Amino acid sequence: MSMAEGITVKKAENPSEWYTQVIQKAELIDYTDVSGCYVFRPRSFAIWEKLREFFDCEIKKLGVQNLYFPMFIPESFFKKEAEHVEGFAPEVAWVTHSGNTELKERLAIRPTSEAIISDSFRKWTRSWKDLPIKVNQWCNVVRWEFNNPQPFLRTREFLWQEGHTLFVTKEDADKEVMDILELYRRISEELYAMPALLGKKSEKEKFAGADYTTSVECFLPTGKAIQLATSHALGQNFAKAFEIEYTDANEEKQHPYQNSWGISTRSIGVMVIMHSDDKGLVVPPRVALNKAVIVPITTKKVNEEVIKKAKEVYRELKGFNVIFDDREGYSPGWKYNEWEMKGIPVRIEIGPKDVEKDQVVFVRRDNGEKVFVPILNVKERLKEMLEDMQGVLLDNAKSFLKENTLFPKNKEELKTAVNDGKLSLINWCGGCEESIKELGAKTLNMPFDQNPKGSCVNCGSKAKFEIYVSKSY
Amino acid sequence: MSMAEGITVKKAENPSEWYTQVIQKAELIDYTDVSGCYVFRPRSFAIWEKLREFFDCEIKKLGVQNLYFPMFIPESFFKKEAEHVEGFAPEVAWVTHSGNTELKERLAIRPTSEAIISDSFRKWTRSWKDLPIKVNQWCNVVRWEFNNPQPFLRTREFLWQEGHTLFVTKEDADKEVMDILELYRRISEELYAMPALLGKKSEKEKFAGADYTTSVECFLPTGKAIQLATSHALGQNFAKAFEIEYTDANEEKQHPYQNSWGISTRSIGVMVIMHSDDKGLVVPPRVALNKAVIVPITTKKVNEEVIKKAKEVYRELKGFNVIFDDREGYSPGWKYNEWEMKGIPVRIEIGPKDVEKDQVVFVRRDNGEKVFVPILNVKERLKEMLEDMQGVLLDNAKSFLKENTLFPKNKEELKTAVNDGKLSLINWCGGCEESIKELGAKTLNMPFDQNPKGSCVNCGSKAKFEIYVSKSY
């Protein structure tokens, strides 16, 4: 483990530099020589593994099966669905050569897999008895779009899961869109402790080729929102373009209804920004790799009693993947700073006086709370503290969201809200997104519980929807 | 589920066409429009998931951490280790464009990740206290090498895990090479029920850039061998090329010793060829997605008593991921054929007479064994049958290997052995691999227990090694 200095800027003052320092000093990310491509180091990949474990288990309960499709998509496939190609073509990475040989047809690296999967769906779908088909893959995708890539948030290669499903009826497809969105909400709130804004994207912001897109959006302490996950109803668009047909019970040809849905490693960056502070990373306990670190306090010469007792505690806490930090040559204070920076949820200190009293000290990462815990109770009390911390992080984020949500009544108020880094819920006409962009903001999504009134806050024509608007990553 | 006819050729008569039919009709593979790239369908991906679960758990016990590196490797990185680039350059897929823009430096899609990982290792390695470093990734790789791609066995994109580790001492690195090889042996023998030939590759066949390569090889009923997994000692070759250095306890700069090791989706194809038969797929129970299928026999009109009893059995066998096949419009015989083709280890039949006797019939996929089982005992007896089948598959494969291993004493005998599709263990000089290739064979590996005698069977000069030789995929 190498020496590391603390975070040198404040989150509130320079959020961009603060983020860059946190993700590197907490060893989440390493930069590479390819701009926009980053190493997901073990401390961040472990978070991804927790998400995967949860989501994979839940979708298998819904009857979804994992599989794997090639990442190369022939250019001709890619062009079949018109909106889809228009949406993705500018950001596609193309393979043109193998060794020294030029390929006959250049190959797109998947920015998403609807095109290649629809081609297989065509072969797998004969009768209504073959439906529903529900598959998912965990894989890498490439979108070479960005001028300003940012680790996790906007990367040229990222990891995600993409689910792809086919149904006989629109009702079943619509229901699944919402079932999956609910799982994404649970990831957001139950795993990442982040309040989820659920809703439907505007026509302009929906997935290229979809009938409609639903999303989970998160509003962050930096005053900007970001899309966390999306669940799309593709309708029959790809089915028609790729000739996916089945014979129904009356022996008639039909196109099935198709969905797709995904969440990516972007979510890790969103979580970092939501909870972390000027000392470094804060990770909700449920997704933390190591739940606690034990630091035996053995100033001057090693105190064998302390080490012995600390090891007992370590063994007792086996299920929590605890770090035991008995490194020599580092002061306890230096160690505290390091583990705070790396976001270990609970620090457990034990010194000579604690040994005498058969106790340890728990220090909580998020609020610095310090409690003395009898060694007999460490397991149960650690469990409690982790659960409490998980709950408090979500509660705090909810309070922040509530305090920072405004309901501007006219364009002037909207402009002020945007400039102040607030989230706005506005009455909206359904158009005029360009002029919202000119304010430096973006439409996020339209909450499912709609109650539009009066005229569009932005342009003044009749309001048809309520929609969230804010600055955005 | 669509109608499917049986396998129309025999394994012994036309192994290549037989293989193509089995992997498609058992729904393991789908072809795509990109030659050499295949869809790993849920029935094969589930096998990969079982392997991953086992191996991931075991390497974590050894202190290995998962992470993820970008798949794009700048051309300049790739060229740093001379042997490495020479070995891999001809089969690299190159990305040259994003959207309509030509990239400044073209990017290799990883054929393996030593180059990009070594660049990060350089940054992570400062002091001897940072070592060992042990990381692993589960990912896709691309090798655009082959004229004759074959699903699973030789594909242009495949899935694998690649482990990459750094040690202070050569002894620790050497030990890990063997620890990992032992895990690969366990995958081969304990999961896939395939006897593993363990040994060291020849100088010519070792990994490009390695000091030495160890491997697991499998000899198949088709009379050809194939490499299942490799564990490489890279020595200090990459460390020197990428300037990976640490300061030792005496404050002196040192290069660490590096390993890498991998097993891929190829292994699924090897397993298919090892065990499957003229009826279709045979899967060792430990890696089978569904351990059994229940077929209620309800000729003419539906017999409700039978369905009710069958469902009881189904509930009792919950932990075995059993298929319940009560589809109408298909005869029991048709269903038996289908599930045999798809390799479900045990078929459970239940008809009106069985209901009277409170029993079911178990039919084992590998040997057709048929037993009557009291319904009270289905769980325990299914467990037994699966374990027995797992053991018998390995025993049979071991017998086959033993019967087909020859010890030719001269070139004429070696030639005959190769032509007859036998595995040969020969005394060997350490060179003359070209003339072995001319026989239509390849060196596989040199068993660790070496006892070379006399002269090289192939060229007559002094024998230095014993090595396995056979036809190869």
Image (tube, coloured by chain):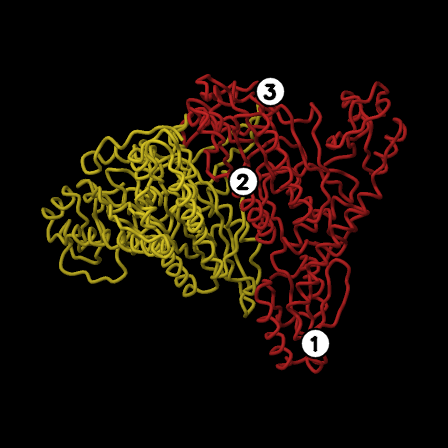
Chain colours: A red, B yellow
Amino acid beneath label 1: Gln
Residue A200 appears at what percent x and percent y? 70, 30
Are both tags, 2 and 3, on one chain? yes
Q: List the single residue furthest toward the top.
A: A252
Crowdedness near tag 3: few (<14), some (14–19) or many (≥20) residues, C-alpha within 10 Å: some
Amino acid beneath label 2: Leu
Q: Which mark is residue A359?
A: 1
Crowdedness near tag 1: few (<14), some (14–19) or many (≥20) residues, C-alpha within 10 Å: many
Residue A63 appears at what percent x and percent y? 51, 39
Q: Quadrant of residue A421?
A: top right
Q: In the rendered view, does A410 fall on the left or right side of B15?
A: right
Residue at horizontal 56%, vertical 62%?
Answer: B130
Q: CA distance from mark 2 to mark 3?
A: 30 Å
Name the secondary structure under disc 3: helix
Amino acid beneath label 3: Glu
Q: Quadrant of residue A184?
A: top right
> Which chain is disc 1 placed on?
A
User: In this figure, which residue is indicated by the disc labeled 2?
Assistant: A62
Q: Earlier in the sequence, mark 3 or mark 1?
A: 3
Q: In the rendered view, does B129 fall on the left or right side of A339?
A: left
B110 and A124: which one is in front?
Answer: A124
Q: In the rendered view, does A84 fall on the left or right side of A124?
A: right
Residue A134 appears at what percent x and percent y? 50, 34
Name the secondary structure under disc 2: loop
Residue A145 vertical position relative to residue A46 in the rendered view, above or below = above
User: In this figure, which residue is indicated by the disc labeled 3?
Assistant: A83
